[in-house]
Amino acid sequence: MAALGWLTPRRRSATALSVLAGEAAAEAARKSSLPAGRSTGTAPATTEEPEPAFPVVGDERAAAFFDLDNTVMQGAAIFHFGRGLYKRKFFQRRELTRFAWQQAWFRLAGVEDPEHMQDARDSALSIVKGHRVSELMSIGEEIYDEYMADRIWPGTRALAQAHLDAGQKVWLVTAAPVETATIIARRLGLTGALGTVAESVDGVYTGRLVGEPLHGPAKAEAVRALAAAEGLDLARCAAYSDSHNDIPMLSLVGHPYAINPDTKLRKHARALDWRLRDYRTGRKAAKVGIPAAAGVGALAGGTAAAVALHRRRR
């Protein structure tokens, strides 16, 4: 995969792997993108109204960037994808338990420990290693219908549609695999997706990543690289996320939005007078927001353990 290093200056806060991951995601996104304004899906009915004068109709140098997990979709895409692969016997129940524990840890403990993130990455890569990209894409379409289609937030979907209706491009930006993210973007009628790029040779996954997961600073690098390649003015662009980990990406654009924000992002957004939207109902959803997989016994056990650990840490 050709590097895009010539497109954009590197930020000092980003590591070399973050830059590589971001540039790889930007290149993959451009290859699979839809033309601006094209929609393959229908926006659900909603009472939400876009704010006056924004997005600006006809501003071709503006675009919108949406985080996926708990911003566009309830729960984590990689977990839902893992459930679908488990159903198809790609791996054993103990590995599903591992997925559930990792998601519970990230959401409840509020800690994205490097060791746990490495473990989560290695789990996912070991599952797809040796499989063809085309095979996972085909299965991903089925998994979207089974586990993801009904978890899209209508309010966030309406915000994305407002940008599309204004003639702007709309991109998902996520740590989920780029193939999964691309399927979701296409189903929602969005332009494309920036996601974690897993290495493949002759269409077969090698079990390695290009750079690192598209997370935190890497997301900002991906948006920066894509904006340079597309001729966008970031000051006229918008970004949407639920997580304080995406503050680097939100800080790049002129119109940052906190959607279903966690506590740290809510505090940061209020301090900087960023716009906030919250489509959740109930205190539990506001505090937790873990993947909706309560029917899996493994998740319940992992959640209980994570809660207990979190309390001890406090």
Image: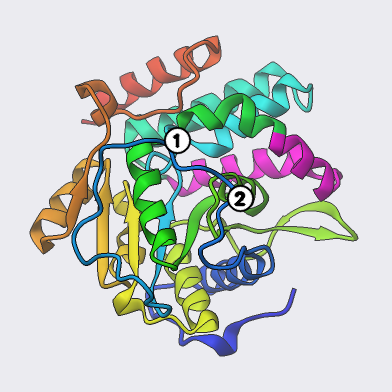
Characterize the magenta stretch by its predominant secondary structure. Answer: helix
In the image, what residue type sits under mark 2?
Answer: Arg
At 32% across and 72% down in the image, what residue appears?
Answer: 252
The answer to whether residue 312 is visible is no
Q: How many marks?
A: 2
Q: Which mark is residue 186?
A: 2
Quarter where residue 137 is shown? top right
Is residue 118 rendered magenta in the image? yes
> Which is more toward the observer, 173 or 166?
166
At 85% across and 43% down in the image, what residue appears?
Answer: 131
Residue extending farthest to the bottom is 6
In the picture shown, does residue 20 fall above or below 104?
below
Is residue 273 rendered magenta in the image? no
Place of residue 119 in the rendered image (x, y in percent of width and height, measured from the top left): 58, 41
The stretch of residues the image draws in magenta is 113-141
Identify the element where label 1 is drawn. loop
User: Which part of the image, by quadrant, shows the N terminus?
Assistant: bottom right
Gap between marks 2 and 1, in whole Å? 13 Å
Q: What color scheme is it? A: rainbow
| Label 2 Cα neighbours within 10 Å, binned few <14 / some 14-19 / many ≥20 | some
Answer with mark 2 or mark 1, whichever residue precedes in sequence.
1
